Image (cartoon, helix red, strand yellow):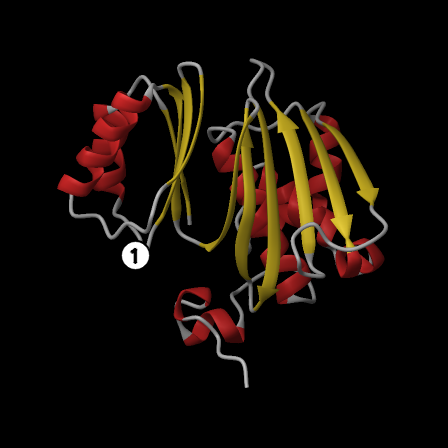
Amino acid sequence: MATKKSYDYQSAFDIIGPVMMGPSSSHTAGAVKIGNAAFNVLGGIKPETLAIHYYESFAKTHQGHGTDLAIVGGAMGYSTFDNRIKDSLTIANDLGIHVDIIEEDGESIGQHPNCAYIKANTKDGRYIEVIGISIGGGTIKLKGINVNGLDVELNHGLPMLVIDGNMNKAKINHLINDLSDMNLDLGEELIKTNDNEGLVVFPLNKAISESALNIIKDKHSDLNVSYIK
């Protein structure tokens, strides 16, 4: 019998399901968290455009299960229990956010039937892509992150740190040493560089405190620091 890796679920409450809007933890609560991941990688800024590609189960049932409302609400920064989720498409339209929803044929690019591939950009030109899968009980895993053309493939649950900006390899090593010195419970980092631009994803084995996050942001204020939880 297959075993579930310990980092997929953080507690029994993840399996039972969180307080949430909508009928399904996989199609609604998990979808909100995939949207939240995109919002955080955008820098906590609402998108100007939002394209959502669905695969397999998500493609077949997204309307009936409220997945559209959930992902769009999540991409605007709403939590799983935010009452605004039920009106998120209307709110997005009122804010001038252009939303495209695409039902893809064929196998899921996330190797899971509950998969959404989000592409979004902000008014200042920041462009991101997030591939997320909802594995049950409101728990998600991220399969890919792209920031301004730098792409990292992964297969990790939350939480994680995503840091990008003007970084060469020496600066990335300095960043890794700084985080290690803070005694954060880091997994193995995933790195992508292009010229002097870098993207580093740090899967975390344990959540970090707000004060620790603020220290990272203050010390590396020239970089974009995103915390996905």
Disc 1: which residue: 206
Circle 1 packing at 10 Å, graded few (<14), some (14-19), many (20+), is some
Report the residue that reaches farthest toward the left: 181
The answer to which quarter of the image holds residue 56 is: bottom right
- Of 143 and 70, nearer the camera is 143
Q: Does residue 151 appear in the picture of this structure?
A: yes
How far across and down, in percent of the image, does residue 120 sit? 64, 29
The answer to which quarter of the image holds residue 217 is: top left
Q: Secondary structure at mark 1?
A: loop
The residue drawn where x is 67% and y is 66% is: 24
Q: Is residue 15 above or below residue 39?
A: below
How far across and down, in percent of the image, does residue 90 sit? 75, 37
How far across and down, in percent of the image, does residue 204 sit? 34, 51
The residue drawn where x is 39% and y is 46% is: 160
The answer to which quarter of the image holds residue 53 is: top right
Q: Quadrant of the N terminus?
A: bottom right
- Of 214 and 202, nearer the camera is 202
Q: Does residue 77 appear in the picture of this structure?
A: no
Q: Is residue 88 above or below residue 32?
A: above
- Of 24 and 228, nearer the camera is 228
Q: Is residue 104 above or below residue 205?
A: above
The residue drawn where x is 70% and y is 66% is: 23
